[in-house]
Image (cartoon, grey):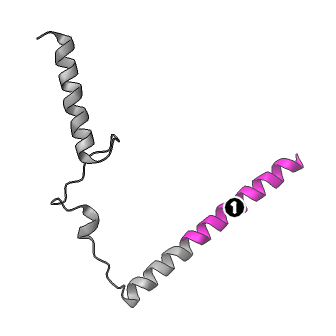
Amino acid sequence: MNKRTLGLAAAAMLGGLGLGAGTSSAAPLAVPDVQTEHALATPVQMTRSERMMMRDRMMQRRMMERRMMRRQMMKRRMMNRM
């Protein structure tokens, strides 16, 4: 067999596989038996202490952002004065 017929045979075989899958995209086929990482995580209700910890953390983040914004504004004001 020469290279041309071998290439045509390989292309026909790959094309047949693509049509057999039902789509002509280059996306990989999904295997139904394999579980994904998302399936392993189950939603659990947070306790009151966890909610409070998250709330405190968010408040700290907001405070830090406000401080940074204030510093930026002060720097800009000082630079504009000069």
**Residue 44 in the image, given as x and y percentages of width and height:** 31, 82
Q: Which span is picked out in magenta?
A: 61-82
Q: Which of the 4 image quadrants contains residue 7?
A: top left
**Residue reaching furthest to the top:** 2
Lateral position of residue 82 relative to residue 48, left or right: right
Q: Quadrant of residue 62?
A: bottom right
For the stretch drawn in magenta, what is the main secondary structure? helix
| Residue 33, above or below 6 | below
Q: Is residue 19 magenta?
A: no
Residue 66 as seen in the image, left or right of residue 60: right
In the displayed structure image, the side of residue 18 where residue 79 appears, left or right: right
Q: Is 47 rendered above or below residue 5?
A: below
Q: Is residue 2 above or below residue 43?
A: above
The type of residue carrying mark 1 is Met
Residue at image x 22%, y 32%?
Answer: 14
* Horizontal relation, residue 23 to residue 11: left or right: right
Check the picture and name the quadrant holding the C terminus.
Answer: top right
Mark 1, secondary structure of its residue: helix
Point 32% across, 44% down: residue? 27
For disc 1, the marked residue is 69
